[in-house]
Amino acid sequence: MREKRWAVLAVTLVGVVLGAAYTAEALRYRWGSLANPGPGLFPVLVGVLVMLGAVGVALETFTDPPVGDAAWPQGVGRWRLLAIVAVAALYVATMPYLGHPIAGTLVMFAALQIMGLANWPLKIGLALCLGLGSHYLFATWLGIPLPTGEWW
């Protein structure tokens, strides 16, 4: 159990360093205001939340009593996990061609299918809202350019 705690501490350190680097890079963008946010506001908030989350995990690990080792998924759970990783890789591979709006919508649909959402109208609606909505939020509202792809 002691090794697990030190492993969590190492991951926490990596999370804090990556969050700090992300935040430092995000500080180069203009912030804008809450009424009219610039492209730097959201990345700075994300970087700070990554650092706080990493520290929170470390605090929880060192203050809570040990609960045992985490179990790697077996059977269907393992295949679902691998399928989600494959879909994420496919998103990265198709983004230059499809752009974020289309690739994001397709990835959301695939992820909802993999997670077992059976209601097709809900699945299609959520995929459209998340894929196209995230493009609207970042590209239009926050002014953060997202890849539009060759086909968009």
Image: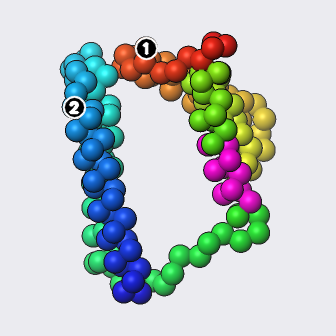
Q: Residue at x 32, y 50 (%)?
A: 18
Report which residue position mark 2 lands on: 27
Q: Residue at x 33, y 69 (%)?
A: 10
Q: SS for tag 1? A: helix
Q: Image check: 102 left or right of 148?
A: right
Q: Which mark is residue 140?
A: 1
Q: Residue at x 63, y 14 (%)?
A: 150
Q: Residues within 10 Å of mark 2 (few under 14, many from 20)?
A: some
Which residue type does callout 2 highlight?
Leu
Is residue 131 visible in this depiction of the protein? yes
Q: Residue at x 38, y 74 (%)?
A: 7
Q: What secondary structure predominates along the stretch shown in magenta? A: helix
| Quarter residue 42 falls in | top left
Q: Residue 145: x, y in percent? A: 43, 18
Alpha-carbon span between mark 2 and mark 1:
20 Å
Q: Residues within 10 Å of mark 1 (few under 14, many from 20)?
A: few
Which residue type does callout 1 highlight?
Thr
**Chain-order first, disc 2 or disc 1:** 2
72, above or below 18, in the image: below
Quadrant of the drawing holding the C terminus: top right
129, above or below 4, in the image: above
The region drawn magenta spans: 79-88
Q: Residue 129: x, y in percent? A: 59, 26
